[in-house]
Image: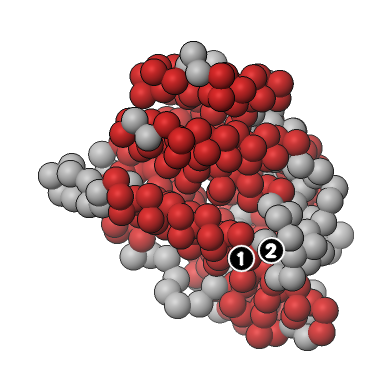
């Protein structure tokens, strides 16, 4: 492999642009471009600086196999993602960490580890240690990584994570670093033609729709600066009904699959309100609907494709984010432990709902 190809691969492995490398070496970007195209070679006096920058020996600079390294990182990534998709996040987190120990300069592996730890550190035996390490990797990515996708991913995670640990001002600062107005998906739908254009439009619509419905659900629980609910229970019920109605319009065939959870949640919240108000009939109806959608979520066909008009052809795939128990288990636990449901637990209709959940809880 030529020295130009080696420099190119080393630069990319470090997430540096040609301009970044040129600035570090005190040469022009054109000079670096000429090296990487094998039109010229760096002066021998520049080899020590290159070796120092890439933390390699001169022999390695003249013959290192970076492609093998990138291939190994790809293999590690695929293996860890496969484990994560199975729901075993405890193991996938350890796999990401092992990969970083093997390739300590890989921002790609750091970013993957950070995302997993943010969502699933509670499933590990050393949650605090993982969180501290992940937060340090966010700092490292933002300080040194030049890959915009990895950087933006770290910023988004920081924006969600920092407020939970009292770093609100830093989160606001991070949010200002994100690109405004345009996204990758917006650009792709303008570039693609034919079937790819249709698929990208469909993906954009589904993403924006489901995000808006999630926001609507969260809106109902918003509080003011004094911690008081902004919406009354009656208004919350109306907001939940709107979310449910929107999903039933969007998936007119009832093929909710992965999105069944977005019907379970508002129905369960409605049941909570009715239970506290002593409205037995309404509570039973909404609790039963929540149970049905929780079960539907836990039993849908991962290989099945949507038939509803907008989502037609989309395969939901497996559940990549679930906790140690399924959604049916979580709802069963809620209905059997929350004090609001205590007056109803001896009623036959409510026991029927509990029995249905027990059949599918894991």
Q: Residues within 10 Å of mark 1 (few under 14, many from 20)?
A: few
Quick one: which residue is furthest to the top in this view?
A: 346
Element assignment for label 1: helix
Residue 66 visible:
no
Cα–Cα gap, marks 1 and 2: 5 Å
As drawn, the label of residue 252 is 2
- Name the image quarter holding residue 29: bottom right
Front residue (pair 42, 78): 78
The residue drawn where x is 42% and y is 42% is: 270
Q: Residues within 10 Å of mark 2 (few under 14, many from 20)?
A: some
State the image coordinates of residue 316 (x, y, percent, origin top left). Answer: 75, 52
State the image coordinates of residue 100 (x, y, percent, origin top left). Answer: 63, 36
State the image coordinates of residue 52 (x, y, percent, origin top left). Answer: 57, 50
Q: Indicate left or right for 108 with 78 as reference.
A: left
Q: How is the image coloured?
A: secondary structure
Element assignment for label 2: loop
Q: Are marks 1 and 2 in contact (CB under 8 Å)?
A: yes
Front residue (pair 32, 66): 66
Q: Indicate left or right for 183 with 74 as reference.
A: left
- Name the image quarter holding residue 355: top right
The residue drawn where x is 82% and y is 84% is: 194
Residue 167 visible:
yes
Q: Can you say which quadrant of the picture contains the N terminus?
A: bottom right
The residue drawn where x is 54% and y is 73% is: 183
As drawn, the label of residue 249 is 1
Front residue (pair 219, 271): 271
Residue 305 drawn above or below residue 344: below
- How many numbered badges does the structure rendering display? 2
Q: Can you say which quadrant of the picture contains the C terminus?
A: top right
State the image coordinates of residue 327 (x, y, percent, origin top left). Answer: 60, 32
């Amino acid at each position: 492999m030529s020295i130009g190809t080696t420099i190119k691969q080393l630069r990319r492995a470090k997430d540096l642009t040609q301009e970044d490398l040129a600035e570090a070496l005190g040469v022009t970007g054109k000079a670096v471009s000429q090296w990487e195209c094998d039109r010229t070679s760096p002066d021998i006096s520049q080899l020590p600086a290159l070796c120092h920058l890439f933390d390699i020996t001169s022999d390695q600079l003249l013959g290192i196999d970076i492609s093998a390294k990138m291939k190994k990182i790809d293999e590690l990534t695929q293996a860890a993602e496969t484990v994560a998709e199975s729901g075993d996040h405890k193991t996938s987190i350890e796999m990401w960490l092992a990969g970083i120990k093997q390739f300590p300069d890989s921002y790609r592996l750091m970013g993957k580890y950070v995302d997993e730890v943010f969502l699933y550190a509670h499933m590990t035996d050393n949650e605090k240690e993982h969180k501290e390490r992940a937060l340090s990797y966010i700092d490292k990515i933002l300080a040194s990584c030049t890959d915009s996708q990895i950087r933006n991913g770290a910023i988004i995670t920081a924006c969600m994570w920092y407020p939970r640990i009292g770093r609100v001002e830093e989160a606001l600062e991070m949010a200002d670093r994100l690109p405004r107005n345009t996204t990758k998906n917006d650009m792709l739908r303008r570039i693609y033609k034919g079937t790819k254009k249709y698929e990208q439009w469909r993906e954009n619509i589904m993403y924006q729709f489901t995000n808006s419905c999630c926001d609507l659900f969260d809106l109902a629980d918003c509080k003011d600066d004094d911690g008081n609910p902004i919406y009354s229970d009656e208004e919350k019920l109306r907001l939940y009904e709107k979310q449910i109605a929107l999903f039933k319009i969007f998936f007119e065939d009832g093929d909710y699959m992965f999105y069944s959870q977005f019907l379970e949640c508002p129905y369960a919240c409605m049941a909570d309100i009715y239970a506290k108000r002593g409205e037995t009939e309404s509570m039973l109806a909404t609790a039963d609907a929540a149970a049905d959608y929780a079960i539907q979520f836990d039993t849908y066909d991962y290989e099945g494709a949507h038939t509803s008009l907008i989502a037609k052809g989309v395969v939901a795939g497996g559940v990549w984010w679930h906790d140690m128990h399924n959604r049916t288990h979580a709802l069963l636990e809620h209905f059997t432990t929350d004090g609001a449901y205590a007056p109803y637990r001896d009623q036959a209709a409510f026991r029927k709902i509990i029995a249905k959940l027990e059949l599918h809880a894991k």
